[in-house]
Amino acid sequence: YGVQFSDASREKPVNLNAENIRIDAENISSQKDRQSKLTLALNLDKTGTLSAAGELGINPLVTRLALDLKGIKLKPFQPYFTSQLNITLTDGAASAKGELKVADEGKEAPRVSFAGDASLDRLAAIDKLDEEDFLKWNRLNFRRINVATLPLQISIAEVALADFYSLLIIHPDGSLNLQQIVKEQKPAQDPGGNAASPKPAVAEAEKPRITIAKLSLKNGQVDFSDHFIQPNY
């Protein structure tokens, strides 16, 4: 089976092509607390592959899958985040292998968790403001990831970055190019045209907990330019 997907709601449409879709499901039922067996495999945009195998419950939604993603290119998904960032991706692919769990616990959104390894390979990005190569690397590895939502918790045993390049610029106003990668979001307007009131502070128990046990950088190059001082350095 094959599916061609197009999302024209973005300024630049998102087009994805899934081929060689293979699904094997047993004992599918909408009866409460019933589980079915599910196996899924497909090719995405020719170079990427996705496979998943495990259990699926419909009422309520409960999923436990052994997930394996390889070579999923990031560039086709760029229209979903380009309006929030001042960088343009020219290359890069994501891979991940581990266990994915999804459970509908009757809250605003299902609880999602993932445990495994992941990597971002051959990433290349251009700074939209300076129109120069901003970031490149051969491989960024995330080893022994544990991610859970509601509340958000992230634990990573090791983050390893190899064969990377980065551009660091101090602009004439003293700001860093790194500070401008994420675009400043304007406050939402209420129907009367006034800025919406800020949301209450997040409770301490709901704040994200992020832990990285080890960080390693290997074979890196950083180009630094200071346009704040005269003459420029």
Image: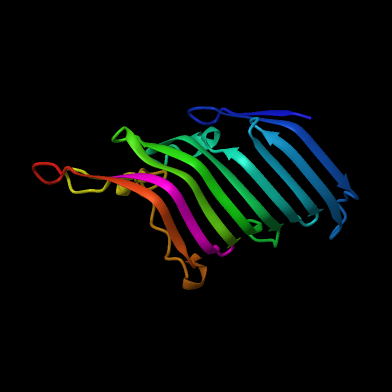
| Total residue callouts | 0
Vertical side of 97 occupied by 78: above or below: above
Q: Residue furthest bottom?
A: 205
Q: Quadrant of residue 226?
A: top left
Vertical side of 14 occupied by 171: above or below: below
**Foreground pick, 223 / 207:** 223
Q: Residue furthest right?
A: 27
x 9%, y 41%: residue: 231
x 50%, y 47%: residue: 139
Q: Which residues are magenta?
A: 148-168
Q: Is residue 150 magenta?
A: yes
**Foreground pick, 61 / 116:** 116
Q: Position of residue 98 (x, y in %)?
A: 67, 56
Q: Quadrant of the N terminus?
A: top right
Vertical side of 147 occupied by 123: above or below: above
**Foreground pick, 173 / 33:** 173
**Left or right: residue 23 compared with residue 85:** right
**Left or right: residue 87 compared with residue 156:** left
Q: Quadrant of residue 200?
A: bottom left
**Magenta-highlighted stretch: main secondary structure?**
strand
Q: Residue furthest left?
A: 230
Q: Position of residue 132 (x, y in %)?
A: 32, 34
x 69%, y 42%: residue: 50
